[in-house]
Image (cartoon, rainbow, N blue to C red):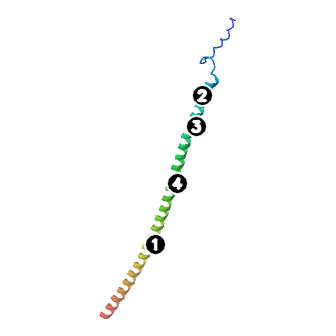
Amino acid sequence: MGPKAKPAAKKAATGDGPGMDPAQEAAMWQYNCTSLHLQLAERSEEASKALAAKRELQARVEQMSKDYEAEKSATFEITQDMTRQYKGMQEELLARINKLEETVQELNDNFA
């Protein structure tokens, strides 16, 4: 067996010189706090805009749904009216055909 490996020497801590004095540390935390407040304000504004857009889209969908139902109802009413008119015309035509057939039969009977 060979010689044992020596443990690696601990690396010196890499710092920016001696620790910060309390005033510098307080200023750093103040800047950090201000930065976080700004980020919170931006995200709150983005969330507010997103909610407004969502409400607008929901209102548009609701309006479109109402418009669709109104058009559907109008189409159904028009279809009913057209069907009623068609049946009425069909009955009139059948009555006219029957009357003309009777007239033809009477004329045939008169000539015979």
Give the structural element (helix, strand or loop) at label 2. helix
- Residue 56, placed above or below residue 10: below
Tell which of 100 and 3 is nearer to you.
Answer: 3
Residue placed under numbered mark 3 in the picture: 37
* Three-letter code, disc 2: Ala
What residue lies at 58% left-to-right and 35% top-to-bottom?
Answer: 36
Give the left or right position of residue 75, taking residue 34 as reference.
left
What residue lies at 52% left-to-right and 54% top-to-bottom?
Answer: 58
Give the structural element (helix, strand or loop) at label 1. helix
- The mark that comes first in sequence, 1 or 4, is 4
Q: How far apart are labels 3 and 1 at the CA level? A: 64 Å
Give the left or right position of residue 39, taking residue 87 as reference.
right
- The mark that comes first in sequence, 2 or 4, is 2
Residue placed under numbered mark 2 in the picture: 27
- The mark that comes first in sequence, 3 or 1, is 3
Residue placed under numbered mark 4 in the picture: 58
* Closer to viewer: mark 1 or mark 2: 2
Label tally: 4
* Three-letter code, disc 1: Gln
Tell which of 104 and 53 is nearer to you.
Answer: 53
Q: How far apart are labels 1 and 4 at the CA level? A: 33 Å
- Residue 7, placed above or below residue 65: above
- Residue 31 at x, y = what percent? 58, 31
Graded by Cα atoms within 10 Å as few (under 14), some (14 to 19) or many (20 or more), the crowding at tag 3 reads: few
The quadrant in which residue 14 appears is top right
Graded by Cα atoms within 10 Å as few (under 14), some (14 to 19) or many (20 or more), the crowding at tag 4 reads: few
Q: How far apart are labels 4 and 3 at the CA level? A: 31 Å
* Three-letter code, disc 3: His
* Closer to viewer: mark 2 or mark 4: 2
